Amino acid sequence: AVTLSSCESSDSDRIAVIGAVNWTRAENGLPALSEHVTLNLKADAWAVQLRNECNIHHSTLSDGAPPEWRKLGENVGRGGSIEQVHTAYLNSPGHRANILDPSFTSMGAGAVWGTCNGQRTVFTVQVFMRS
């Protein structure tokens, strides 16, 4: 289970992740996603776990999700910068589909930095929701 308490992601990093998603959606004629505090906590907790493992894999989507969810999606990635990870998401059909899914209305994000194999790395998690 995901423990939800406080966020390790900085506000500026979280805003950068959500901003990149909403810029991409706007470029494709889609409305912006609203930021959801509970989804931020879920995404951040998962990003911390991924950083601690130096690995990426998906969470159990419903763990830590708010009760009003009807559809959930998740992108997880790692790289040298938030921008690099976002570009990788856009170059991956499944990740791009989550970002551009017109049914999603809100999202949360986490971006947690660590050192893995001697490289400074950011782990980003995007959680998308339709309620």
Image: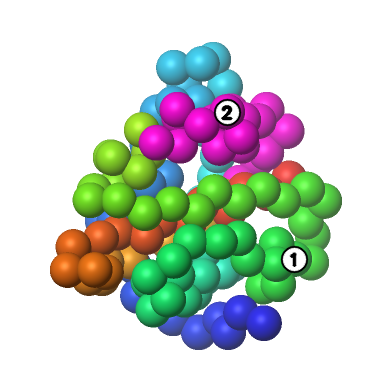
Observer able to see residue 48: no
> Where residue 4 sits: x, y (%)?
56, 81
- Magenta span: 88-106
The amino acid marked with disc number 1 is Ser
The amino acid marked with disc number 2 is Pro
Query: For mark 1, what is the residue?
Result: 62
Q: How many numbered circles does the render carry?
A: 2
> Where residue 107 sits: x, y (%)?
56, 50
Observer able to see residue 1: yes
Q: Nearer the viewer, residue 97 or 4?
A: 97
Q: Nearer the viewer, residue 18 or 119?
A: 119
Q: Residue at 60%, 60% (x, y): give it.
A: 58
- Crowd rating for badge 1 (residues with CA inside 10 Å; few <14, some 14–19, many 20+): some
Mark 1 lies on a secondary structure that is loop
- 83 in the magenta segment: no
Mark 2 lies on a secondary structure that is helix
- 100 in the magenta segment: yes
